[in-house]
Amino acid sequence: MLEHPDLRLRRLKRFHGPGRPASEELDAGASAMLQTIFVLTVMTVTILVPAGWILGHLDEYRSRR
C-alpha cells in the first residue's frame, strides 16, 4: 500500500459539536470503513432506485405501443 505506516497509528477525534471535547476516539481504519459503507450505500441506491422505478412502471411502457 502507498499509505505511510504512521498514518495508520494516528487517531482521529469525532466531532460532537462546538464546546464539547470528543468523548470517543475513532481510528483511521474505522473512519475508512465508514466512508466505504457510505459510498457503497450511495452507489447501491443510485443504481437500484431507477431500476426499481422502471420495473414498477413497465406496464405503462408496454401500453404505449
Image: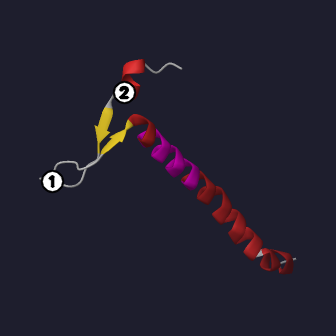
Element under label 2? helix
SS assignment for the magenta stretch, majority: helix
Kind of residue at disc 2: Leu
Kind of residue at disc 1: Pro
Q: Position of residue 47 (x, y in %)?
A: 66, 56
The segment highlighted magenta reads 31-41
Q: Residues within 10 Å of mark 2 (few under 14, many from 20)?
A: few
Q: Position of residue 30 (x, y in %)?
A: 44, 42
- In this view, the residue in front, 49 or 58, is 49
According to the picture, the residue beneath numbered tag 2 turns out to be: 9
Left/right placement of residue 36 relative to residue 12 reads right
Q: CA distance from mark 1 to mark 2?
A: 26 Å
According to the picture, the residue beneath numbered tag 1 turns out to be: 18
Q: Is residue 60 above or below residue 36?
A: below
Q: Residue at x 71, y 63 (%)?
A: 51
Element under label 1? loop
Residue at the extreme right: 65
